Image (cartoon, grey):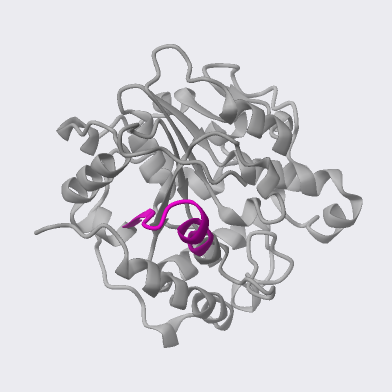
């Protein structure tokens, strides 16, 4: 993995936003996709991981209950417009090559939203050009039940929802491994090897103090901030400017329905649930994320009120 990064006199033009599932990251991605000069990528390494699983008979059998293993690779039913691509081309080597290319004409910065779980064991496939590594976090008491609800859909689970275990045979969960929170582990890696103070923002801050949090983020990564960036087109038109598989705008995109129809950072409407009120599997998932979340939360860019 490259340790190169932009200097203070060379504003970063390539930015990673790393996340765990259900962290408001796709809403943030849509916001950035409407900024001037943005060239935006949506989870190219996650799609590479999915294609890697499909290419391995042993892994395909293990995860055969997941919808992505049955996805049409040509996606002929989706219009071939903009930067949307067939899912089959998202492979680790191809993604690395694309992210290392010079910026496209008219683009002033490259923005990639992705998940560290997808690069575990594939650090050599990260681009060997300077990138600013940034992170978005969310209270696990909010993200765990939300992720569980999503897993019910992406597993196409037909049984008793109360008996569903989100942590069983789930390639997006690593709580039974030596590194249960890949986001936290990668944040520590970046701190030790790339930049000592990587940018961290919190999803609750975005919803409670959107202007200050977005302004702070833009300043930290070298994007000129505009008040107009706080709202954006709620339609799917902006999605055609995002580098992603075509199914991102199809009916299959269960994970992103709310985020992709967003037009702003919606205010928080309720407090997070109590830990005791989570299902046992969500409690287990939440417990594995709390330590990392709490430490990263202390280092986040804090809104000045």
Which residue is depicted at the point 31% across and 29% down? Answer: 233
Residue 166 x %, y %:
63, 70
- Return the residue nearer the eye: 77 or 27: 27
- Return the residue nearer the eye: 99 or 35: 99
Residue that extends furthest to the top in the rendered view of this protein: 105
Residue that extends furthest to the right in the rendered view of this protein: 57
Which residue is depicted at the point 27% across and 47% down? Answer: 265
Relative placement, left or right, of 82 versus 260 is right
Q: Quadrant of residue 214?
A: top left
In the rendered image, residue 165 lying in the magenta stretch gets the answer no
Which residue is depicted at the point 68% across and 41% down? Answer: 125
299 in relation to 258, above or below: below
- Return the residue nearer the eye: 17 or 243: 17
Residue 141 x %, y %:
41, 74
Residue 81 x %, y %:
55, 16
Which residue is depicted at the point 31% across and 28% down? Answer: 35
The residue range painted magenta reads 187-201
Relative placement, left or right, of 280 versus 229 is right
Q: Quadrant of residue 70?
A: top right
Query: For the image shown, how many numbered marks are present on the structure?
Result: 0
Relative placement, left or right, of 13 versus 118 is left
185 in relation to 56, above or below: below
- Location of the C terminus by quadrant is bottom left
Residue 47 x %, y %:
66, 41
Residue that extends furthest to the bottom in the rendered view of this protein: 276
- Return the residue nearer the eye: 204 or 266: 204
283 in relation to 208, above or below: below
Relative placement, left or right, of 135 versus 160 is left
């Amino acid at each position: 993995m490259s340790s190169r990064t932009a200097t203070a006199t060379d504003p970063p033009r390539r930015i990673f936003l790393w996340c765990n599932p259900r962290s408001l990251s796709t809403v943030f991605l849509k916001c950035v996709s409407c900024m001037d000069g943005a060239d935006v990528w949506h989870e190219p390494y996650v799609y590479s991981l999915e294609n890697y699983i499909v290419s391995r008979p042993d892994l395909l059998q293990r995860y055969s209950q997941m919808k992505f293993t049955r996805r049409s690779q040509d996606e002929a039913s989706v219009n071939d417009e903009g930067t949307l691509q067939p899912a089959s081309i998202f492979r680790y080597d191809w993604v690395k090559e694309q992210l290392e290319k010079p910026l496209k004409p008219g683009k002033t910065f490259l923005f990639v939203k992705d998940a560290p779980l997808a690069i575990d064991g594939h650090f050599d496939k990260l681009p060997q050009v300077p990138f600013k590594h940034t992170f978005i976090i969310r209270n696990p008491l909010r993200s765990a039940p939300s992720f569980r609800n999503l897993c019910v859909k992406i597993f196409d689970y037909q049984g008793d929802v109360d008996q569903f275990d989100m942590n069983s045979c789930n390639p997006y969960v690593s709580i039974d491994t030596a590194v249960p929170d890949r986001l936290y582990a990668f944040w520590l890696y970046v701190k030790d090897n790339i930049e000592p103070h990587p940018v961290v923002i919190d999803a609750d801050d975005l919803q409670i103090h959107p202007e200050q949090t977005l302004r702070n983020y833009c300043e930290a990564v070298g994007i000129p901030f505009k008040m107009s960036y706080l709202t954006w087109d709620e339609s799917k038109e902006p999605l055609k400017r995002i580098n992603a598989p075509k199914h991102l705008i199809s009916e299959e995109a269960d994970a992103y329905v709310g985020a992709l129809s967003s037009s702003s950072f919606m205010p928080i409407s309720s407090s997070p649930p109590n830990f005791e009120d989570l299902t046992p599997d969500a409690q287990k998932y939440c417990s594995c994320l709390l330590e990392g979340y709490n430490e990263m939360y202390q280092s986040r860019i804090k809104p000045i009120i």
